[in-house]
Image (cartoon, helix red, strand yellow):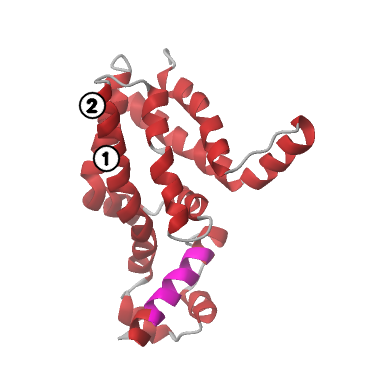
Amino acid sequence: MANRFDTKTRILDAAERLFAERGFSETSLRLITSKAEVNLASVNYHFGSKKELIRAVLARYLDVFMPAASQAINAQRKQEQQASLPEIFSALVSPLLKLNQLCPDGTRTFLQLLGRGYIESQGHLRWFITSHYGDHLQTFVKAVSESVPEIPAADIFWRLHFTLGTIVFAMASADALMEIAAADFNESNDIEAVIRKVIPYISAGVAVSGN
């Protein structure tokens, strides 16, 4: 049992790193098995297919993040029924940072993986996330919609996807941005600081009126 567990974990760890660095489409099962030092039959035995492996990699993060995010948003809404957008987005910071406890740099890795799923049109991931974590997603979308009731649902959809893109880009370039801020403005930042700097920007973007 221990060897079986170790093999599965090695596959997940190798796939996670490669998916985040290279993307889902550009990462072959052969490359993953080489990195994990296992044979192809092990991937088929534990996961069945590449799609199932992709879902399993993301599930390690989503199983932790989604319930924690819902809990944080619900706690915020109990304090203030119509929470502001900065308050709603800020409620997600702690659940995001807790992902660093799963693995080093877990917060950034998760956001990069999530971004890969949208950039590469991994339709099965949208089905997987909505079918397994739909209630948690609705908690977030409902809180955002109630915060800006004048914004049509279709516009909320687009703006939240633009928000995800902004966050993914910020995380992907976080090291370079922090180095520039340190050199040019004598600022000392970490990942949490970068996330919090993004919040006013995305809040304003979601809330802006007009087309």
Overall secondary structure of the magenta section: helix
Task: Tell me the kind of residue under disc 2.
Answer: Lys
Q: Quadrant of the C terminus?
A: top left
Q: Quadrant of residue 81?
A: top left
In-image side of 92 versus 104 (left or right): left
Q: Could you give the CA–CA distance between mark 1 and mark 2, rounded to whole angstroms?
A: 11 Å
Q: Position of residue 77 (x, y in %)?
A: 26, 26
Question: Can you say whether 61 is above or below 169 in the image?
Answer: below
Magenta region: which residues? 6-17
Question: Which one is earlier in the sequence, the residue at label 1 or at label 2?
Answer: 1
Q: Answer whether residue 15 is magenta in the image.
A: yes
Find residue 71 and name its label.
1
Task: Tell me the kind of residue under disc 1.
Answer: Gln
Crowding at dot 1, Cα within 10 Å, few <14 / some 14-19 / many 20+, comes out as: some
Q: Residue at x 70, y 34 (%)?
A: 187
Residue carrying label 2: 78
